Image (cartoon, rainbow, N blue to C red):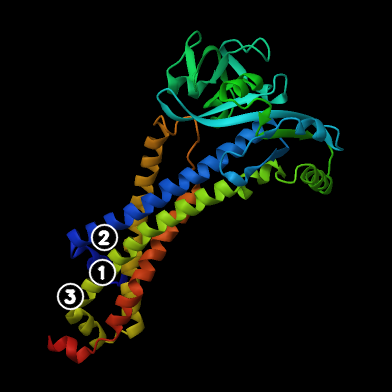
Amino acid sequence: MTFFTVIVRGLIRRPVRTGLTLVGISIGIAAVVALVGMAWGYEKSIGKQLDVIGIDVVVSNMSGGLMPKVFDDSLQANIKPLPQVADTTSVLMQMLSIEDAPMMMVSGREWGGFTWDKLKVLEGRMPKDGTEEVVVLGRLAAEVLKKKVGDTVQIEATELPVVGIVDGQAVVENGAILLSLPVLQAVTGNEGKVNFIDIRITPGTTKDQVAALCAQIKGIFPEGRAMVASEVVGTSQGFRVARAMSWSTSLLAIVVGVLGVMNTMLMTVFERTHEIGILLAVGWKRRRIVAMVLWESALLGLLGGLLGVSLGALGLKLLETTPAVHGLLEPDLSPKLLLTSIAIAVLVGVVSGLYPGWRSSRLSPSLALHG
């Protein structure tokens, strides 16, 4: 009988207990995949949006959360003449409940600004000018709201006609309602206010020059900040809180998994004192007994991790189709997340087996054989 055979037999001897332990681990790992996948997915979706539009530097006051505080749009006039600034445009972005959709991105954009450039019209047309009180929908937003060209969309207390459906080449763009900045300012009561100024820098600008530009903007706008687009998501307080919440919630599920595996392995050790005693009597070293228990618990973790990753991936795919998520983000199912989740599951197994392994190694061969 090989070492691996002993390990496998130890797990299949009590199939119900082993199965329930696997379910406990898999639920914890599924929570990791689902919660962390949602948080990472939202970050990646925002990052892709910034890249598609071609934004180099973002000016905002992001300290308040996922959506920054509004500020006076006259700030743009002070930023535009700065060195290395090739172009600027102002945006007012709001997360609002729209009709039956609990949360949807509504983006009011300066008419003629470069944030309109990458939108491809699939149906209908774009607004005629910056004062026309109409909206265009990203293709995912049109699906969620079940709207077509000619319908109306209610934003706050105002109904606005849908004149076009567009492809924005990024999930966040496709899940948004787009309209000109003055129209959204009027609808939401934010006249003269924006919460983003997007900047394109002059080609050939060095990192040091970009850093100097951000420092100049900080001097002009002390309560806000200017960040390189690639760093916006990683440094935002709102995103950091979302990541912390996803991991802390996942940790609770993992702790439950640790307790479940530890309980299973302790029961296994108590029930196998006779067997362990025989193994010690025939020459097995105590460290090999410990290794046997650790390998059993690690195998439990691995199998639970594989099952949990599958459940978590399925859960994310289902969540992606719900109105609350569809069009807001693309959940992250990257190999990094999946491998990290499986590694966590194996670590849970190993940690859970430490105490039972130590207990098993303390058994006396004579006492075990006496039973």
Please report contact status of discs 1 and 2: CB closer than 8 Å, yes or no: yes
Cα–Cα span, label 2 and label 3: 17 Å
Location of residue 268 with respect to 131 vertically, above or below? below
* Disc number lying in front (2 or 3): 2
What percent of the width, then of the height, locates residue 200? 76, 33
Residue extending farthest to the left is: 371
Label 3: which secondary element:
helix
Q: Residues within 10 Å of mark 3 (few under 14, many from 20)?
A: few
Q: What amino acid type should be assigned to the residue bearing mark 3?
A: Glu
Cα–Cα span, label 1 and label 3: 12 Å
Ranked by sequence position, the earlier of labels 1 and 2 is: 2
Does the image show residue 251? yes
Residue found at x 25% / y 73%: 266
- Image quadrant where one finds the N terminus: bottom left
Q: What amino acid type should be assigned to the residue bearing mark 1?
A: Asn
Disc 3 marks which residue? 271
Does the image show residue 339? no
Q: What amino acid type should be assigned to the residue bearing mark 2?
A: Thr
Residue found at x 85% / y 37%: 84
What percent of the width, then of the height, locates residue 17? 20, 62
Residue found at x 84% / y 41%: 205
Which mark is on residue 263? 1
- Image quadrant where one finds the C terminus: bottom left
Location of residue 22 with respect to 165 vertically, above or below? below
Residue nearest the viewer, comparing 147 with 367: 147
* Disc number lying in front (1 or 3): 1
Residue nearest the viewer, comparing 257 with 135: 135
Which mark is on residue 21? 2
Cα–Cα span, label 1 and label 2: 9 Å
Q: Write down the quadrant of residue 292 in the picture.
A: bottom left
